Amino acid sequence: MNLVHVSGDTMENLKNARTWGGIGAIFSLFYVTYLVGFVLKLFAVKNIAEATKKENIFKDYIWAALLNITASLILSWAFYNMWDKMADVIHDPEKVAELTSAFGTWSLIAVVIMIIGVWFMKKSYDAIARETGVGTFHTAALFYLMGAILTLIMVGYFFIMVGAIMEIMAFFALPEELPGAVSEAPTPGSVPEKAEGTGNAEVSEEPVTSEEEPAEATEDVTEETQQE
């Protein structure tokens, strides 16, 4: 298992991601607070990317956000355009059919863009699941993807709602430390071990010095004896 050194900043990022992401996911359930929830989730994913040192987590989520915003704008414009012109063409079946066909075409384009966006979100959430060990992120992304694909037949909204609930659970399940993390602070036992090692080295040097001094003294006595 790979060990990851964890600093105080990493723990702080994960705590912030858990709080902001969980609250943001709850706000995203309601139309009036959706924008606030989206921003909070954006900051949460950024904190997770910084904590895990995986930049692709945030980059993929940014792509997902941009594509989903584009899809929402296209769908909103198509709906507004159809509603605005419907009163003028309501008595002309051919124009009504043309208007409905145009709305269906733009809706299909929006759904395709949304599916691509959700795919990028799934890549981001799958990476978060691998790095944090919270598999609920993978499950939430899977429900979001199925919901996006099935949006055209209206069943997709049920899967999107389930995915949103799973997303809330996933953010609040984030740990304070990454799996297999090792603190950068030295352990209490490491200092005594170094001290013992240093002490052994000093003791081993002292006998060498004591052995050399008698040897020199013996040589001096031998030389004096020979001279006499």
Image (spheres, grey):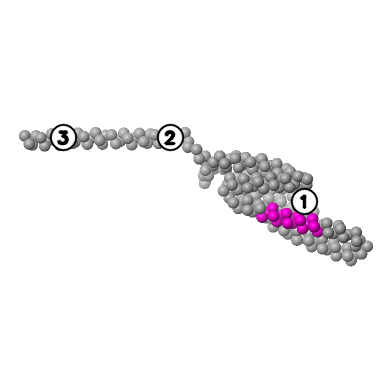
Q: Residues within 10 Å of mark 3 (few under 14, many from 20)?
A: few
Viewer-side label of 2, 1: 2
Percent across and percent down for residue 180 are: 54, 43
Looking at the rendered structure, the secondary structure element under dot 1 is helix
The residue lying at 33 percent from left, 36 percent from top is 201
Looking at the rendered structure, the secondary structure element under dot 2 is helix
Q: Residues within 10 Å of mark 2 (few under 14, many from 20)?
A: few
The magenta segment: 63-78
Q: Residues within 10 Å of mark 1 (few under 14, many from 20)?
A: some
Q: Amino acid at mark 3?
A: Thr
In the image, farthest residue toward the bottom: 94
Residue identifier under label 2: 191
Q: Amino acid at mark 2?
A: Val
The residue lying at 74 percent from left, 43 percent from top is 27
Q: Is residue 169 above or below residue 112?
A: above
Disc nearer the start of the sequence (3/1): 1
